[in-house]
Amino acid sequence: MLPLSIYFSDEYRLLSRQQLAKSLGQSFALPGQSLTDSWQALKPYLPPLQGHHETEPDELALIDLAQTQPLTAEAANQCFNRYLKHLEQPGPSILLINPADLHPRYEALKRKLIREGVCNRLHALALSARENRHHLILRVPGEETLELTLEILAACLARPDLDNWGHLGICLHTSSKRILPTLGWLEHLGRSLNTRIPIKLISGMPEPEEILNAQQAGYIRYPVLTDPEQCRISHELCQYFLQSPNNQSLHASLLSHHPTPERFEPPPAPSDIFLPIRSNVVGTPAGQTLTDTALTDALAQRSRQAFDAKPLINGASLSNETTRERLNPAQVEQTLGQLHPATEEQVRQAIEAAQDNQQSWNLAGIKQRTGIIQAWAERLQQEQHALIATSIHETGLSVRDAQADLRTAINLCYYYCNQAHTKLTPRTLHGYQNEDNRLELHGRGIYLCLTDHNEPFATAIGQLAALLVSGNTVLLHPDSSCVASLSQAFGLLLEAGLPSGVLAVLPGDARVSQWLLEDYRISGAACFLAPGRTAEVNALLGSRRGAPIIPLLSHSSMPGTQIIARRLSPPEIRALLHSAFGNAGQQRTTLGTLYIEASIADEIEQQLASAMQQLLLGDPTQLETDIGPLSRRDQMELCFEHIERFRLRERVIAQLELGEQHNHGYYVPPTLLRLYTLDELSAPISGPVLHLIRFEREHLPRVLVEINRYCPGQASGLYSHNAALIEEVERDLQASRLLLNCPLSDTSASIHPAGSSGFSGTGPLYGGPNYLMAFVRERATTRRR
């Protein structure tokens, strides 16, 4: 990162725009105090400010025509035409342009797809503004889209017919940690194009949305300053640069000031927002140049390495003569590597090793066990790019979905470590005189963990963390579609200090799970499979004559339902589509069915169908892809069979069109299907398929009965501001997780636990405060003194 002093020295003139752009990216996670310290050391050597030159021209009013960000291409066209209509009127005026109004997917990861189109529209607006004597100022970009906005501004200013115009600029917030590199970059741009660039500055405290976004995305640090004094210093720093001899092309004025709120307290760091319950995993956001480069490099490196997924027993990867090819789900002609299924002899070895190590692992104590899992979580965070790259290639998850999956897994590790200290420590019981009574919690023994293809990191890593901190040894039988990704993660677990015999990974087909389930030494089972397969496991465990009775804890992949009883905003429509089609519909919290009140059904269906066309189905290794292929061929075939059954009945409402590029992978187009009742679904569908059912308001009790009958205990939600309606749903809907006026979201440790009742599973909520209690046995000890 460039030192602060360089912006005020003669060396600044020697910098290239590429060097300034790199510094802009590096400043994203700059510690706020380092900026303050650097400025205090530099300020005595600079000439004093020559008064406040930032004054808004009185003769021109700033006009803001912004509305809600467009949901569809048609809405973006309407926004563009609204701007153009104003600019066709005689000027002068200053028109505030929001680039996000010019494209429905104005997102950093979409930069390659949208940059040229948005630039062309901005160019057309600039030509009209120049002709009619208007000025254009781009709205303050969010930190996530700052680099994208600057690229578009630079491309537009470089157009020959805007030479020497000098009335296309941008609004910037001085609380951004990147404000000085941004001003330096813009000054270099204006100097190289020999044009004046107007800058409107907003001083003071940052927008609250920037704080919230950083917390939800898990940034290493806030990209904006959160201390009032640091915000003041940052604004002063901008003034010094703008008045320095190094500024030859920027003309700045102060647009507004955001004062410090009363009783203001700086927010905790993004990693600390959930303390003392758990840490929050942090990382650098996708969509920033430096992060995208690191991800792209990791994906390229992974593509050059063949997978060799083997059973892991006693810390060693074991080969066998029988191997299976692992195909790329996005390009089935490409072989990713080989899978070595576990043999019956290897299963026996794994069980013996787990039995030999269980007592010592249980007696190791909570502090040692959680220390290892905590260290593992930190290693997962350090190696996140490599892990994400493997998962994308192997499972077909998009970049965003793979990142979210790994983040959830790491947060579950942090949470279960904390819960182990608060829930599993021995407790003193009441007693008579001369008597000490104590309750201890120990691991049950050898746990069998069966996982499917849904959310591979969150499922396997999260479950493994829960079982291990509870004092159990674990035999993991993962789905074949994600063995390489998990093996890479478990290698880091061994590096973190896990005794080699405590964990065994046993990939393979149904025979492997059969061998494991038949062994009487198994003390418990955790099952993350489809409801039908879970029922088979339960029946097998119950039919073992003479075997101990063992607990089965399950979390089935059962799509959720939501009830829509009011109009939805564009962000809410986008959230619904993400709930339904994120992870290609392969999540435990996937939205499978929408009940829509009849009076608003036409409007909601049209919004969903139109917005769905903006989703990009394609190669998951490309950063701009929204939805990748399914991870398995059989899942793809089931989805297509289901869709075609409804197509024959003319029930397909909308569907994304497939192209030639989709013919060589397990791609299923996002599809909206019409149902009249949930009883038309014979089985849950794992894929990007959303079912829509209309209902009349007076028939809501029937809807609730239907949901409870078809999928009791699954995640459900309601969009309504009607208090009586909310009360009715809360009372009558048997949902293990109920969401009111928010989408079905991913599992998030300690705040969004996943459901476990009825068909969706058994036992405590996954990621909730009672979860670890399912994996321990109690022992009461009495001692007479």
Image (cartoon, rainbow, N blue to C red):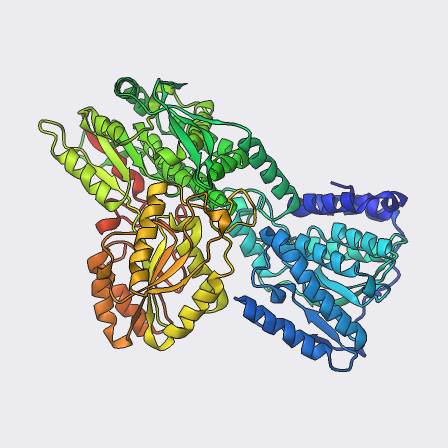
Residue 254 screen position, x and y as percent? 76, 66
Residue extending furthest bottom? 90
Residue extending furthest left? 545
Residue 648 screen position, x and y as percent? 30, 61
Relative to the observer, which residue lies in front, 396 or 762?
Answer: 396
Taking 177 as reference, is 329 above or below it?
above
Relative to the observer, which residue lies in front, 49 or 253?
Answer: 253
Q: Quadrant of residue 250?
A: bottom right
Give the position of the C terminus as an image quadrant. Answer: top left
Give the position of the N terminus as an image quadrant. Answer: top right
Residue 291 screen position, x and y as percent? 61, 42
Asked whether residue 200 appears in the rendered view, the answer is: no
User: On the picture, is 62 further left or further right than 751?
Assistant: right
> Going 24% across and 44% down the picture, which residue do you hit?
763
Relative to the observer, which residue lies in front, 338 or 527?
Answer: 338
User: On the picture, is 193 further left or further right than 103?
Assistant: right
Q: Quadrant of residue 770?
A: top left
Taking 751 as reference, is 613 above or below it?
below
Q: Quadrant of residue 534?
A: top left
> Going 80% across and 72% down the picture, which residue do you hit?
130
Residue 412 screen position, x and y as percent? 41, 40
Relative to the observer, which residue lies in front, 485 or 162?
Answer: 162
Asked whether residue 646 appears in the rendered view, the answer is: yes
